[in-house]
Amino acid sequence: MSEPAAREARGLPRIEVDPESVDWHELHRLVTAAYASMHGRIDPPSSLLTMTTADFERKAADEHLIAAFVDGRLVGCVFCEPQDEWLYIGKLAVAPALQGSGVGRLLIDAARRFAERAGLDGLELDTRIELTENHRAFGRLGFLKVAELSHPGYTTVTSIRMRSRLESTRIKTP
């Protein structure tokens, strides 16, 4: 039995990079449910509101999809795209019932391994300025704020960029 299959047999999430088979409607429902709490809290509204199942399928074709499954059911995902020396991660989503259970950490760990194999410096993400609980959660995962950003047409900060450098790329000092 493969390691991912053995994990799932023990009730732990099975993590797949670029899974061969994805139910795009299920993925759309997952991300929509995971992001529901931000509706009405962030300005401008999330691009997710205009995304269709076909958009997610195209996104996965253009980038890399890391997915988490439990009992064959999709419970988490993150999209990854190398940008310069960083692996940009976006649309990180965990089923609401499993948020806080470690699924997000497993997805981030898988993205780190992907970045390391690709010879990149680490992970990079953007998170909305209003979502301070996300800032704290990413901080616990080793991310640090590196920039404040504004969406087009906005003069105030609307998001922050965070990075987590891979251990293998950190400068070692005596």
Image: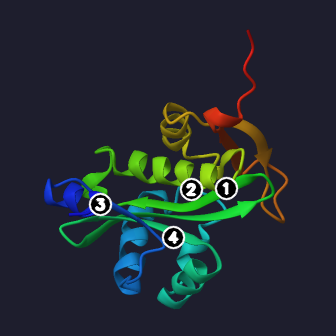
Q: Earlier in the sequence, mark 2 or mark 4?
A: 4
Disc 2, SS = helix
Q: In 3D space, how far apart are the residues under numbered discs 2 and 4 (Cα atoms)?
A: 11 Å
Percent of width and height locating residue 101? 28, 45
Position of the N terminus by quadrant: bottom left
Residue underneath mark 4 = 65
Q: Are marks 2 and 1 in contact (CB under 8 Å)?
A: yes
Residue type for callout 1: Leu
Q: Earlier in the sequence, mark 3 or mark 2?
A: 3
Viewer-side label of 4, 3? 3
Residue at image point 71% right, 46% down: 161
Which residue is at the far bottom?
54
Q: Amino acid at mark 2?
A: Phe
Q: CA distance from mark 2 to mark 1?
A: 8 Å
Which tag, 4 or 3, sits closer to the chain's start?
3
Residue 35: x and y, percent?
45, 62
Q: Secondary structure at mark 1?
A: strand
Earlier residue among tags 1 and 3: 3
Residue on which the image places disc 3: 4
Task: Say which residue label 2 marks.
Answer: 114
* Numbered circle sitting on residue 8: none
Label 1 and label 3: CA atoms lie apart by 23 Å
